[in-house]
Image (cartoon, grey):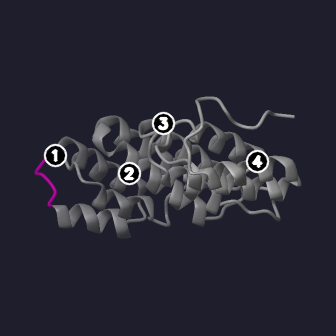
């Protein structure tokens, strides 16, 4: 089998509606060592693929090229954040933001992006899951003030004025808290 050009790979990923063709080109791209997230982004946005198929490709890509895993997980999260289906993809978005943060725990983007996908009318992803995620993040990011501000907003949404105020004070102090110093769980 002759190798596919990068243009052929991009074209198939963005326009094909045949899963088998997409899968074959994906496998060829991996064999050819296409170690750049850019063409795979087109694959993730292919409207003919189901969420499970997108996950299959993303997980395989992240396993094959570990240096791309963080970006792959952020892209998967953003795809699931803006696509709708009979199942709410917000929980998949949060799942992939968590995977990205596990790879680079000091990066603030996965935490903030996860908060941005919260839908208060539907409570998806679940508010307390976001709170728990951010609480873990304040111990790992170098400058947790922004996470404390977001936690304050989330606690406001939950109706917990005391924890919200505590987080505001922590953010205003501009000091990194000692490990484990987050408001207690009720």
Region of the chain picked out in magenta, as a range? 1-5
Residue 72 in the image, given as x and y percentages of width and height: 40, 50
- Which image quadrant: the C terminus? top right
Q: Which of marks 2 and 4 is in front?
A: 4
Q: Is residue 42 visible?
A: yes
Q: Residue at x 66, y 56 (%)?
A: 150
Local crowd size for mark 4, using a 10 Å CA cut-off: few (<14), some (14–19), many (≥20): some
Which one is in front, 135 or 125? 135
> Real-space Cα distance between discs 1 and 4?
52 Å
Q: Nearer the viewer, mark 3 or mark 2?
A: 3
> Real-space Cα distance between discs 3 and 2?
12 Å
| Precedes in sequence: disc 1 or disc 4 | 1
Q: Nearer the viewer, mark 1 or mark 4?
A: 4
**For residue 22, what is the image quadrant?**
bottom left
| Precedes in sequence: disc 2 or disc 4 | 2
Contact, mark 2 vs mark 4 (Cβ under 8 Å): no
> Real-space Cα distance between discs 2 and 1?
20 Å
Q: Could you say whether the residue bearing mark 4 is in a helix, strand or loop?
A: helix
| Residue 4 drawn in magenta | yes
Residue beneath disc 4: 166
Residue 1 placement, left or right of 36: left
Residue 101 placement, left or right of 145: left
């Amino acid at each position: 089998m002759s190798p596919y050009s990068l243009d052929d790979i991009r074209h198939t990923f963005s326009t094909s509606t045949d899963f088998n063709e997409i899968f074959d080109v994906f496998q060829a791209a991996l064999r050819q060592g296409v170690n750049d997230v850019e063409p795979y982004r087109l694959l993730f946005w292919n409207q003919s693929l189901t969420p499970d198929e997108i996950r299959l490709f993303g997980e395989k890509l992240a396993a094959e090229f570990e240096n791309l895993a963080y970006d792959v997980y952020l892209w998967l999260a953003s795809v699931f954040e803006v696509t709708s289906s009979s199942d709410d993809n917000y929980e998949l978005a949060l799942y992939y933001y968590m995977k990205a943060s596990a790879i680079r725990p000091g990066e603030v983007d996965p935490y903030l992006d996860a908060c941005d996908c919260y839908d208060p009318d539907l409570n998806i992803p679940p508010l307390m899951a976001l709170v728990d995620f951010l609480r873990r993040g304040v111990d790992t990011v170098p400058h947790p003030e922004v996470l404390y501000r977001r936690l304050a907003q989330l606690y406001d949404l939950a109706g917990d004025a005391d924890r919200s105020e505590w987080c505001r004070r922590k953010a205003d102090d501009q000091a990194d808290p000692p490990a484990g110093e987050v408001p207690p769980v009720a």
